[in-house]
Image (cartoon, rainbow, N blue to C red):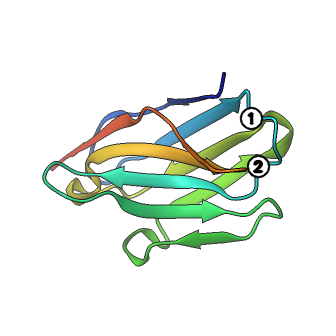
Amino acid sequence: QVQLVESGGGVVQAGGSLRLSCASSGIIFTINNMGWYRQAPGNQREWVASISRGGSTYYVDSVKGRFTISRDNAKNTVYLRMSNLRPEDTAVYYCFCNANKQYLGQGTQVTVSS
């Protein structure tokens, strides 16, 4: 059974930091890209960041310089370090893994208060 288990969400004041983690298990195919989406209330899901198996990273413009994505291939885990958080970063954050298909986590809430 495939599972993507996220952790690290919470409530933080503007300017603060959080680190999200997402551990995947049960995927028997090679995991290629891993990354994160987010969805704020009333908005469509938005891609936030991706990292290739080789470590190349990609970010949506709104988080460049503030968020850092990383991964541990041995643990099939992806991380998202979020700094200088803003109220507009408030959303449910979903991790994803691309293998034979895309797998999504259940989501973790991030709330940034002003």
Q: Label 2: which residue? A: 31
Compared across the picture, whether 9 is left or right of 81 comes to left
Compared across the picture, whether 19 is left or right of 25 comes to left
Please tell me which residue lies in front, 41 or 15: 41
Q: Residue at x 64, y 50 (%)?
A: 101
Q: Amino acid at mark 2?
A: Ile
The image's mark for residue 84 is: none
Please rate how many residues cluster around mark 2, counting C-alpha atoms within 10 Å: few if below 14, some from 14 to 19, many from 20: some
Q: Is residue 36 above or below residue 107?
A: below
Contact (Cβ within 8 Å) of mark 2 with mark 1: yes
Please tell me which residue lies in front, 14 or 43: 43
Q: Residue at x 73, y 63 (%)?
A: 52
* Residue 38 position in % (x across, y down): 36, 52
Q: Secondary structure at mark 1?
A: loop
Q: Label 1: which residue? A: 27
Q: Residue at x 53, y 63 (%)?
A: 49
* Residue 40 position in % (x across, y down): 23, 51
Q: Is residue 76 above or below residue 100?
A: above
* Residue 79 position in % (x across, y down): 61, 45
Q: Is residue 63 above or below residue 39?
A: below
Q: Residue furthest right?
A: 74
Please tell me which residue lies in front, 101 or 110: 101
Quarter of the N terminus within the rendering: top right
Compared across the picture, whether 79 is left or right of 38 comes to right
How many angstroms separate mark 2 from mark 1 (CA)?
A: 8 Å
Q: Residue furthest front?
A: 100
Q: Secondary structure at mark 2?
A: loop
Q: Residue at x 48, y 73 (%)?
A: 64
Q: Amino acid at mark 1?
A: Ile
